[in-house]
Image (tube, helix red, strand yellow):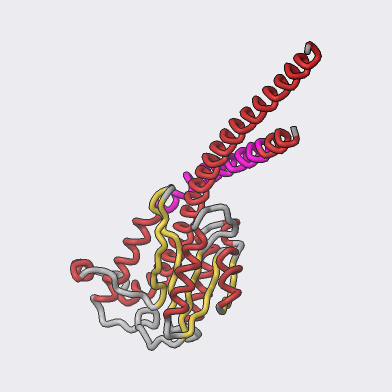
Amino acid sequence: MANLKEIRNRISSVSSTMQITSAMKMVSAAKLKKAQDAITAMRPYSDKLTQMLVGLSASVDFENVYLNPRKVNNKLVICITSNRGLCGAFNSNVIKQCSEIAQSSNEKVSFFCIGKKGADILSKNFNVIEKNNDIFDELTFENTSLIGEVLMNKFLAKEFDKIEIVYNKFKNAATQIVTTEQFLPIVNNNSEDDQNDSADYIFEPSQIEIISELIPKSLKTQLYKSVRDSYASEHGARMTAMHKATDNATELRDQLKLTYNKARQASITNEILEIVGGAEALNG
């Protein structure tokens, strides 16, 4: 009977875990819908703004510190993870990518961590210059812009010669793509046709003034998009992980119930055999 009690306790424990994972799945599903709508609406704007900036820059002889590459001695990597776990390989994939960048680079690599999980792991082995764990409490463009200004100032002060962003790009609830993007200096990823598009426009004020105004806004938008992408990916990954955990807990609970019923049936059979054996002994 002690064995039956142990199985009952395990069934109760697994059932409690299943309720928790199921609740977490529903919470993440609700948050994912809002986060997915936000990043889906923002991506076209961000991509077009970057395309426009690079196209304008390529069509005019314009010197700007944000556009001009320089010899890289110090590189900064912005690592975007989450503050909480229980989301599968979401955080570990980004941390692994950051570690590989640091180990394979010939330059001195430092990290700016957005999200507690990345900061906790990377700070053990690498130089983490700053952490920001509060951005997800109120994820707005204004709050992200403050981080963008800090990064741009560090680049202007030549503390770092190159800045990259590593984050999870949202594809769907089940798929997140670890992505590395160059933040500074701004790189030209547009085709030659895209760059020639700006030749058909008349600019007011001047083209150079427009570029100077667009550069900070484009950089802040790029950073905000990356954080938004990571936020949506986090909830997608957590929803998927909790769905699998709930399924596994259900399967384990069913197996334990089957084991319990078999053990209980065996126990009852043994008791019947003992009673029958005792009765036959008395009759004999």
Q: Quadrant of residue 216?
A: bottom left
In the image as oriented, which residue stretches furthest toward the right?
282
On the rendered image, what quadrant is the C terminus found in? top right
x and y, in percent, of residue 8 in the image: 69, 34
Horizontally, is 233 left or right of 83 in the view? Answer: left
Do we see residue 2 in this rendering?
Answer: yes
x and y, in percent, of residue 277 in the image: 74, 19
Queried whether the magenta region covers residue 25, the answer comes back as yes
Q: Which of these two is toward me, 66 or 191?
A: 191
Queried whether the magenta region covers residue 45, the answer comes back as no
On the rendered image, what quadrant is the N terminus found in? top right
x and y, in percent, of residue 125 in the image: 57, 77
Do we see residue 199 in this rendering?
Answer: no
Horizontally, is 150 left or right of 63 in the view? Answer: right
In the image as oriented, which residue stretches furthest toward the top?
283
Figure disc tally: 0
x and y, in percent, of residue 56 in the image: 28, 72
Horizontally, is 160 left or right of 133 in the view? Answer: left
Q: Which of these two is toward me, 127 or 158?
A: 127
Q: Quadrant of residue 266?
A: top right
Q: Residue at x 73, y 34 (%)?
A: 5
Region of the chain picked out in magenta, as a range: 11-40
* Residue 213 higher or lower than 274, as above or below: below
Q: Residue at x 37, y 56 (%)?
A: 43
Q: Main secondary structure of the magenta part?
A: helix
Q: Residue at x 39, y 79 (%)?
A: 66
